[in-house]
Image (spheres, rainbow, N blue to C red):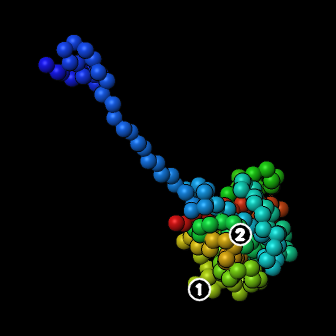
Amino acid sequence: MAALAAGGALVVGGLGYTVAAWTDSEWVYAGDGSGGPGIGTGTFEVQQSVTSPYTAGFTDFEANPGQAMIFTPGSQTLSPGESVYAGVALRTTATTTVPADVQVRAAVPATGVTVADAGGSLFSALTVRVATVVVSGTGAAPTCTAAAFTAPTTIGTGPLASTGASAPQRLAAGSASTQFYCFEVTLPQSAATAASTALQGRTVAPAWEFASTSVE
């Protein structure tokens, strides 16, 4: 009488025999067709330039306060009703493999920059407009002046402390496009402002974040 015992041994008349069998295995791996790995990650990096005509000098400033934008002459001696302008351009790096959506956030005080604005009165009084235009490849950006603020290029207008862009802008991968932004900061004209000395002799340093997200 033969019986199969635990462990794969065949028991016949009290004698044990090991069951033998052929075995084989096959493997595959994620490859690239030439012996290398077949799965990996892309690269993603957005850079900025604040130097006109914004065709070079792109670099990273990824924490507040970032890089200094130099506004037009008179920016530190504003009178009611006056506006000043400054521009910045953003694009992805040449090695970036995916597009980016960029959203301009509302201004906050620049970290580490000493100002004279007790109580934040001037920061609260100022208004901002933001205009944008896309330039193909590495072409030069337009001049940042009042003429830049026409529909549909204006993407934000309102109080400095609460106004960001109304929608994100799409940057092409691989530096294929450059997004130019023009900022206009204004001390509004009003009877109260003109008659008051409360805002005189003050300074502020607003900082804007460009929040970027990769797009698949």
In the visual, does 208 lie left or right of 39?
A: right
- Indicate the amino acid at tag 2: Ala
Residue 122, image quadrant:
bottom right
SS class, disc 1: loop
Q: Are marks 2 and 1 in contact (CB under 8 Å)?
A: no
Q: What residue appears at the point 64 percent right and 61 percent down from the top-left corner?
A: 44
Q: Circle 2: is it few (<14), some (14-19), or many (20+) Cα within 10 Å?
A: some
Numbered disc total:
2
SS class, disc 2: loop
Q: Is residue 148 visible?
A: yes
**Residue under numbered circle 2:** 94
Instruction: Tell me residue 146's x, y (percent).
Output: 72, 84
Depth order, front residue of 33/40:
33
Instruction: Tell me residue 160's x, y (percent).
Output: 66, 66
Residue 120, image quadrant:
bottom right
Q: Residue furthest left?
A: 1
**Residue under numbered circle 1:** 151
Question: Of the residues under marks 2 and 1, which one precedes in the sequence?
Answer: 2
Which disc number belongs to residue 81? none
Instruction: Tell me residue 132's x, y (percent).
Output: 65, 78
Residue 9, image quadrant:
top left
Q: What residue appears at the point 78 percent right and 76 percent down from the top-left corner?
A: 54
Query: Is 183 rendered above or below residue 145?
Result: above
In space, the residues marked 2 and 1 are separated at their CA atoms by 31 Å
In the visual, does 58 lie left or right of 167?
A: right
Q: What residue appears at the point 75 percent right and 83 percent down from the top-left corner?
A: 139
- Indicate the amino acid at tag 1: Ala
